[in-house]
Image (cartoon, rainbow, N blue to C red):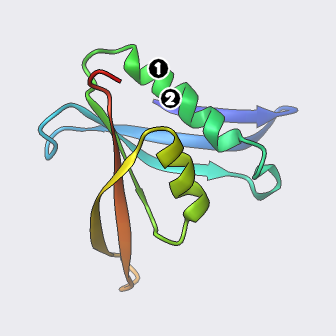
Amino acid sequence: MDVFAKLSGELIGLLGTRETNPPDTLPTIKISGVYIASKARGRGIGKKLMLHLLKEVVRNPRWKKVKIKVFPTQEIAINLYKSLGFEVIEKVTEDFPSGIKRETFVMEKSLINP
């Protein structure tokens, strides 16, 4: 499921997801990316996209959790996800195709008895 935000017909935000099961033991939605156009940041667009996604996901009892990865330097995003009930469950070092290694937080929100 992908969620889009438009302002006056112009795309200003998007949120992409995919199903990941396995390696997760429970059916999981992974947020693969959240993008807000720079001119639209600070207007609550990211929160609206996330709330819309969560509303849709909880309608399907199949899904048990939602995950997202975020860099520790993305404090605004981390605070948003925490305000929506996500918790940091793991810190991993990821190898990117460019050869760069970066620490990443894996955040998760349980949908069981939300």
Q: Looking at the rendering, which quadrant does residue 100 occupy?
A: bottom left
Three-letter residue code for mark 1: Glu
Three-letter residue code for mark 2: Leu
Residue 56, which numbered label?
1
Secondary element type, mark 2? helix
18 left or right of 24 in image: right
Image quarter (top left, top right, bottom left or bottom right) of the C terminus? top left
Residue 53, which numbered label?
2
The image shows residue 94 at horizontal and vertical percentages of 31, 73
Viewer-proximal residue, 69 or 109? Answer: 109
The image shows residue 53 at horizontal and vertical percentages of 50, 29
Secondary element type, mark 1? helix
Residue shown at the point (55%, 36%) measured from the top left = 50
The image shows residue 74 at horizontal and vertical percentages of 55, 65
Q: Looking at the rendering, which quadrant does residue 6 occupy?
A: top right
Report crowding for label 1: few under 14, some 14 to 19, many 20 or more residues within 10 A (C-alpha).
few
Report crowding for label 2: few under 14, some 14 to 19, many 20 or more residues within 10 A (C-alpha).
some
Residue shown at the point (83%, 32%) measured from the top left = 9
- In the image, residue 43 sits, relative to residue 55, either above or below, namely below
Residue shown at the point (36%, 63%) measured from the top left = 105
Extreme residue toward the bottom, this view: 99
42 left or right of 56 in image: right
| Contact check, label 1 and label 2, Cβ < 8 Å | yes
